[in-house]
Image (cartoon, rainbow, N blue to C red):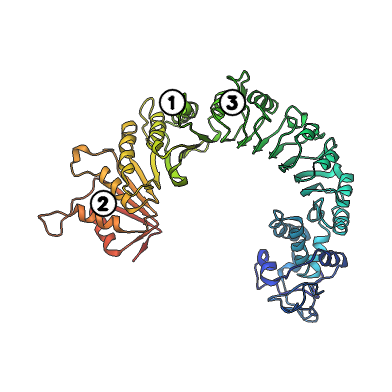
Amino acid sequence: MDKSHSTTLTKYRLDQLVANSLSAAAVDLPEAVALLNSGEACSAEYQVRSTDAPADSSTAFVLDQVTTRDAQHPLPSSIDDMPIEIFQGIVWEVVKESLSLSVYAYYSDITRMRLVCRGWTGILEGMPEVWAKLSPCMDERLLDLALSRSIHFPLAITGWLLSSPALDKLLLHTYRWKYLDIVVVEPDVLHSIAVLSVPLLEELRLDLSPSTSQEILPAFNPSAPKLQIVEICNGGIQWTASTLSNLHELILLDIEEGVLDVDTFLELLSHSPRLTRLRLRHAYLIHLPPPQTRVSLSHLESMELEYLGQGIVKQLVESIDVPTSTKCCFGIALDDYPETSLYEQLEPIGLRLATLANVSRGTRSTLTLTIEGGGWNFKVSYERDVDQHGTLTTVVEAMPRSALNVFEYFACQLGRGEPNPLPPVLHIVKLGYEDTGENDSKLLEKLYDHLPDTDEIQIDNTSPRSIENALNALFPSNPSSRLFPRLSTLTIRNAWHETWAGWLLKRQKRQYKRGGVDPLPLQTLKIEGGRLGTEKVKGLRKLVPNVVLEGVEVE
């Protein structure tokens, strides 16, 4: 490797070298193309763009913290003895950090990396995968250079689908397309790729702008025998097309109403029995009578069905059989004036929760209850410690007054059947959305009705008033009215106002014995995050035999 103009590498970690040693100013694309073509690398004779220079100044880069090495006295470096294959792997790890950027930003980063030294320049130019990210709207000269250097490496095509000379050249290389992620802004251009042969294509992501005409979309059916991942946003395509068969991932987002009905969607799923991920969000499927099609997806790892219109989530959950190991995420908006009750609307999701609880009996699990969106979204999550068991997350959008009923319904489903020798941990997050905090104590009462054997509760990110209400419900002055008699561990998490601790210590202080306190019926009190004074910590240690502090700011 020629390091006659190399930078000192020993001062920096290699994966931070470019960020720490090269601080580039804005690079106009023609300048970047010229530099990429020139084969030049950094040298001691570099120019610095003045802050007062005009925007069209030919000086393109500012080098920061770069120390040039004397060519006659090179410093020893372990890179001298590194096999080229290993060094290429290191360079590729650096390059991958920029792959998520736009094509323009990506090649700007490549240009900066070439400035490190001539060795890096040679390495980059000899790696076809570095030059395989292309776009229909990129500079034509840069496209020619990238097509030449990528040789026969599979291509990733991203960006806006526009009529351009670059697109015409890319269409000559469709046999190399492996990844296609485009935003369709000129509907007529879609005809250019509607019936292409793309034998290597594995991933297709189409974002159809609102101006895109629906009439041309049914014609979109490229020949892609290796296609595994499809994502469609803001539109529809020919849902019965062979393109949508034998998929591993299917993602449909923001599909307009009237484009797809439930039965057609289920039929589409039946063509991909090895599907591992299914996501459907804001896709307003046509509501039909109970669907006639039933689908079994035995390989499904993740299923997300969110906000699909009234009754659609219920229909799909009832019609798709998935393993108990599948991670499920549901989003449903309840009808405030329903013909069916809240329980009927949530029934298929509740049955899924009951099934998970049954198969996980004897293993530790956690039920998390959260109020979000200013009190309008109620989130219920159920997770198990055993990896082979799936999880369930449901966000229910409803009137704030429905919160307790929603949470009680899922607690009821979880408590069905025989008692669990390892009852679920109750994780209550941010419920104090009302000033009174009354819902906290009422919720605990309803949870106790269905999960009386709970032995661990976590109270997370709630207001001091909410914590006080919860403690008052858990440890009432009359022990005979206590909730959760088996409770042994209580966790207070992210409580940044220590007033709750002062309130508890004052309440537990004995009236007739100086310095005496009434201990809490707990084995362990965990305090995670937040802030506490030293005296408060000492006082809590008198109330509970085992007080554990994790990440607490003790003042």
Looking at the rendering, in which quadrant would you find the N terminus?
Answer: bottom right
Q: Circle 1: is it few (<14), some (14-19), or many (20+) Cα within 10 Å? A: few
Q: Residue at x 23, y 39 (%)?
A: 482
Amino acid identity at mark 1: Ser
Give the residue pinned by disc 3. 320
Say which quarter of the image contains residue 273. Answer: top right
One can see residue 523 in this view:
no
Q: Reading the chain from its start, which is encountered first: label 2 or label 1?
A: 1
Q: Picture coordinates of residue 305 (x, y %)?
A: 57, 34
Q: Is residue 404 left or right of residue 188?
A: left
Q: Which element carries disc 3, helix, strand or loop?
A: strand
Looking at the rendering, in which quadrant would you find the C terminus?
Answer: bottom left
Q: Picture coordinates of residue 450 (x, y %)?
A: 34, 31
Give the residue pinned by disc 2. 544
Instruction: Measure how far apart labels 2 and 1 are at the Cα level.
Output: 44 Å
Q: Residue at x 81, y 69 (%)?
A: 118
Amino acid identity at mark 3: Ile
